[in-house]
Image (cartoon, rainbow, N blue to C red):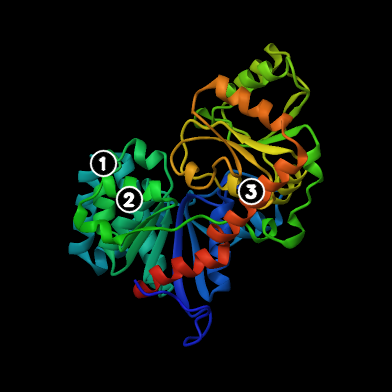
Amino acid sequence: MPAVPEAFDTVVRGSIRVAYLVNVYPKVSHSFIRTEIAALERAGLNVSRFTIRRTPESFADEEDQAEAARTIPLLDGNIAQLAGSVVRSFTRRPRRTLNALRQSLRSTGFSVRALAYFAEAAALAERMERGNIRHVHVHFGTNPVAVARLAARLSPITYSFTAHGPDEFDAPLALDLPGKIADAAFAAGVSSFGRSQLMRWSSPLHWERIQVVRCAVAPHFLEEDATDTTGLATKRLTCVARLGAQKGLPLLATAAARVADTHDFIIDVIGDGDGRAQLEEQIDRLGLTGRVRLSGWRSSEDVRRALTASRAMVLPSFAEGLPVVLMEALALGRPVIATSIAGVPELVDDANGWLVPAGSVDALAEAMKAVLDAPYEQLREMGQVGRQRVLLEHDPDRNARHLAGLLMPFL
């Protein structure tokens, strides 16, 4: 695929239009999508944001508030509007519309979900045609790709998608990952590992269209003044994670209880989720109240400040793609403790952090002790290595130019 120039000098900036579709957008945990869209717009594209469902979150971050205001929900409680899109699609293209409905029913069985996907696809196709948008890029290879795939059957548009994992790779056949790749203009993994999983679940005939498009950190993590090293002298660790089964936070609490026998420290956990009550109970039971602190979701700037005030970042995940928060910590010159899973070893090694086996409380506790015992100069050097790696691989404007080059033939 052709590379995109530094800027689209041969066209009027903003005249090249592309749609983005996400299941729920914006979300605090999806800030990397906002970063990617903003970088594409700086490169000259005009991006229309669509979401299947309106986000239930309230945002402290003004950029998230603005992003929510400019994002169009396909499901917005207006059944009549969805039905109107379906009727108009049948009127304009009866054969294509009937074939798309049959495809939806075959894929998911005769169910409310199949009909919902079909109606959402009709609404998306109609809005894209109205806006003269020829291509939609989707984040996550789950139900939003199913909607985009149906929309491409309803109208002369194309779609591509970025798969992050682990959800797509946990149920590839149930999600019809092979079919989604076969019909896509291209598919992308966020790491070489992710690309390999897309290749694993697709025909070799389609491997040429599978790319690596790495996520990027927000620009304020890459600023020159983002390398304040005073936090390296503290005994503070930070974990930024959704409080759910995939992130392994109960393992972190168990390891912290062991480390507390010999070391002084504080762990600030930024994030929330359905595992919060259980984690709070465990923290209280292990006598870690005041030592492991749950602060809920915070803005991107709050995360930056917390990481800057920390000695290191710790993330004991059981399943991942390639966490952006690891990139953010490294960009700020903070070493990380992470599990050796999925794409993580492509970013983290013993030059910039500690990789531990997933699920091992012993290894996690030992890594935490090593961080707390490490001299300042060692942590500073590891942080410098990590920052340079992020600057090379996860710069938003460089990565957006790569993605724009993949999109251009279809715009």
Q: Earlier in the sequence, mark 3 or mark 2?
A: 2
Badge number at residue 108: 1
Above or below, 147 relative to 319: below
Badge number at residue 330: 3
Above or below, 29 relative to 97: above
Looking at the rendering, which quadrant does residue 185 occupy? bottom left
Is residue 314 in view?
yes
Q: Earlier in the sequence, mark 2 or mark 1?
A: 1
**For this rendering, which residue is in front, 116 or 52?**
52
Measuring from the top left, give residue 135's x and y in whole percent: 37, 68
Quadrant where the C terminus is found in the figure: bottom left
State the count of labels: 3
The reply to whether discs 2 and 1 touch (Cβ–Cβ < 8 Å) is: yes
Measuring from the top left, give residue 189's x and y in whole percent: 40, 52
Q: Amino acid at mark 2?
A: Ala
Residue, disc 2: 146
Is residue 84 in view?
no
Please name the residue shown 78% across and 32% down the image. 235
Q: Amino acid at mark 1?
A: Thr
| SS at badge 1 | helix
Please name the residue shown 48% across and 56% down the image. 214
Measuring from the top left, give residue 45's x and y in whole percent: 50, 74
Q: Amino acid at mark 3?
A: Leu
- Packing grade of label 2 (10 A; few <14, some 14-19, many >=20) is many
